[in-house]
């Protein structure tokens, strides 16, 4: 759905996200920044090779938004997170600030788990953060990331 059907908007979100700052602020520097898919579960990925669009680049994000027809920024509406998960809420607050620097506006909307899952299953959302349990089976990982179904 618009505007997420435009890869430039999705890449702009990624470029506007400072993952290192989130890690430092929310987890006190514990852990490491990695790709979206847990590296240890992706056969053939060495954990060292650079991942495209995973660098923090506010100017690059603004450029992509302008190319996508949003030279003055974009309002993406509600960003739904699990209210009971303090780490998710903290990270979402940081992302909201980071995205604003690139001209991306979101309205943070913490929800209780049951209504959040109902919203997720209906596909009735723009941005939603939910933790998924990963499987070591590459087919499960790929299907969750590439399925046309709203929740993988």
Image (tube, grey):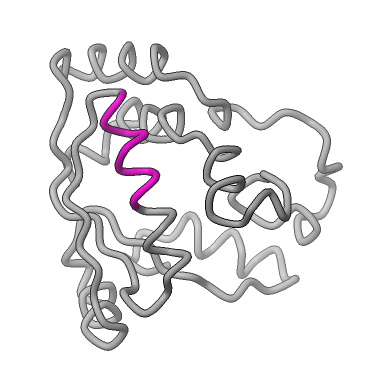
Residue 128 versus residue 149: which sits nearer the camera? 128
Q: Is residue 96 magenta?
A: yes
Q: Residue at x 30, y 30 (%)?
A: 9
Rendered view: 146 above or below 150 = above
Quadrant of the image occupied by residue 123? bottom left
Percent from the top left, x then y, of residue 29? 68, 48
Q: Main secondary structure of the magenta part?
A: helix
Q: Position of residue 30 (x, y in %)?
A: 72, 55
Front one among 108 and 143: 108
Q: Residue at x 23, y 82 (%)?
A: 118
User: Which quarter of the rendering shows the C terminus?
Assistant: bottom left
| Residue at 31% in and 83% down | 113
Q: Position of residue 131 (x, y in %)?
A: 49, 70
Q: Is residue 1 above or below residue 101?
A: below
Q: Is residue 110 left or right of residue 89?
A: left
In reply to whether residue 118 is colored magenta, the answer given is no
Q: Residue 132, percent across and down?
A: 52, 72
Residue drawn at the location 16% of the way across and 17% of the way down: 69
Of residue 130 and residue 93, the one placed in the foreground of this image is: 93
Residue furthest out toward the bottom: 114
Residue span colored magenta:
93-101
């Amino acid at each position: 759905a618009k505007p997420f059907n435009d890869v430039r908007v999705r890449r702009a979100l990624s470029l506007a996200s400072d993952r290192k700052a989130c890690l430092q602020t929310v987890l006190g520097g514990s852990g490491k920044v990695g790709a979206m898919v847990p590296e240890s579960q992706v056969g053939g990925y060495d954990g060292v090779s650079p991942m495209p669009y995973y660098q923090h680049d506010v100017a690059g994000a603004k450029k992509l938004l302008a190319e996508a027809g949003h030279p003055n920024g974009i309002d993406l509406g509600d960003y739904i997170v699990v209210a009971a998960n303090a780490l998710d809420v903290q990270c979402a607050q940081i992302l909201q600030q980071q995205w604003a620097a690139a001209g991306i506006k979101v309205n943070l909307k913490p929800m209780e788990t049951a209504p959040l899952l109902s919203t997720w299953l209906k596909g009735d959302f723009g941005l939603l953060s939910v933790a998924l349990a990963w499987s070591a089976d590459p087919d499960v990982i790929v299907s969750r990331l590439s399925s046309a179904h709203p929740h993988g």
